Amino acid sequence: MEQKHPLPPFTLETAKQKIQMAEDAWNSQDPEKVSKAYTIDSEWRNRDTFVKGREEIFLFLQKKWEKELNYKLKKEYWAHTENRIAVRFEYEYQTKEGNWFRAYGNENWEFDENGLMAKRYASINDLAIKEDDRKFR
C-alpha cells in the first residue's frame, strides 16, 4: 500500500512537517512528484476549477507551470485536526509576457489513513506586482 509519511493523526510537529514537504514539492515544479502526494481519486477545487484524480492533477499542474514561470511558493501553518490541515500561502510567478503576480490564498486539506491527500480545496486571489516588489527570489 502506498504511504506518504507523516501519517494521520497529526500533531503540531507532523502537520508542520507535512506542510513543509508540500511546499518543497510544489517549488520543484515537478507535476509527477507533486501528484504522487494525492490519492488516485483525490478531489480538488483550485479557484474555479474542479479536478478529480491523480491523472487530472498531473495534467493541471503541467499546464499551470507552463504558464506560471519563475514560480516560488511559501506555505504557513494555520490549523490542524486528526487528518486535516489548513494552510495559508502566497506565491509569485511571471507570465510569458513578463508580468509578475503574487497569489494569496488558503487551502483545506484532508488526508487518508496512508497520508495521501484525498481532498484539497484552495481559494486563491492574484495581485499584479512590479518585479521590484517581489518577496521571493
Image (cartoon, rainbow, N blue to C red):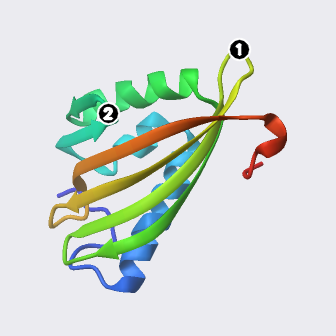
Residue drawn at 40 percent across, 71 percent down: 78
Indicate the quadrant containing the N terminus: top left, top right, bottom left or bottom right: bottom left
Of circles 1 and 2, which is in front? 1
Q: What's the residue type where badge 1 is placed?
A: Glu
Is residue 97 shown above or below 2? Answer: above
Instruction: Classify mark 1: helix, strand or loop.
Output: loop
Q: Which mark is residue 57?
A: 2
Residue 102 image-quadrant placement = top right
Amino acid type at mark 2: Ile
Relative to 61, 126 lies left or right: right
Q: Compare residues 21 and 49 and report the one nearer the observer.
A: 49
| CA neighbours of label 1 inside 10 A, class few (<14), some (14 to 19), many (20+) | few
Q: Quarter of the image holding residue 51? A: top left
Q: Earlier in the sequence, mark 1 or mark 2?
A: 2
Q: Is residue 119 left or right of residue 19?
A: left
Can you give x and y, in whole percent of width and height, for residue 121 in the image? 27, 47
Residue drawn at the location 36% of the way across and 41% of the way down: 35
In the picture provided, is 23 more to the left or to the right than 40?
Answer: right
- Tag of residue 97: 1
Relative image position of residue 57 (x, y in whole percent):
32, 33
Q: Residue at image x 50%, y 66%?
A: 76
Q: Position of residue 111 (x, y in %)?
A: 21, 61
Secondary structure found at label 2: helix
Q: Which mark is residue 62?
A: none
